[in-house]
Amino acid sequence: MYTTKVTRIGKIYGCRVFKDGVLILSTCVDSKDMIGPAFRDLLRTIAKFGVDDEFIEAARRRNSKLGNKTASVKHIWHDKEQND
């Protein structure tokens, strides 16, 4: 199961994606209004690896919704060994 979490760190927002409680992917954005676009970009990338998950697919549908902002953010991958 995929989940997301945002943490404000000073003037930036850390956006993290977890799979079964383990951090797998993250990025940072400068403004609150870019949190949604950043998550859509991160989740879209996960979907490109063939992940078949309802949460991921819902984000992909929102990415192409008229009026939604888009973003291309730096992807910071976290492997399992970093989390042990």
Image (cartoon, rainbow, N blue to C red):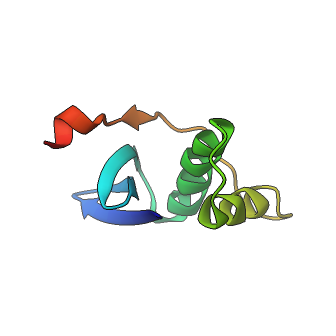
The vertical placement of 32 against 52, above or below, is below
When asked about the image quadrant of residue 8, the answer is bottom left
Residue at 13% in and 42% down = 84
- Side (left or right) of 9 relative to 32: left
Residue 42 coordinates in the image, percent (x, y): 54, 46
Residue most extreme to the left: 84
Query: Residue 61: image x %, image y %?
Result: 78, 61
The residue that appears at 37% across and 54% down in the rendered structure is 16
Residue 36 place in picture, x, y as percent: 57, 62
Front in this rendered view, residue 4 or 84:
84
Depicted 14 relative to depicted 3: above or below? above
Residue for point 72% across, 56% down: 60
Q: In this view, does 71 lie above or below 65?
A: above
What residue do we see at 54% from left, 55% from top? 39
Q: 51 or 65, which is in the foreground?
A: 51
* Number of numbered discs overlaid on the protein picture: 0
Give x and y (percent) for residue 56.
Answer: 63, 58
Asked whether 28 or 60 is in front, the reply is 60
Asked where in the image residue 79 lies, by quadrant, the reply is top left
In the rendered view, does 5 fall on the left or right side of 37?
A: left
Q: Is residue 14 left or right of residue 43?
A: left
Q: Decide: is 66 above or below 23.
A: below
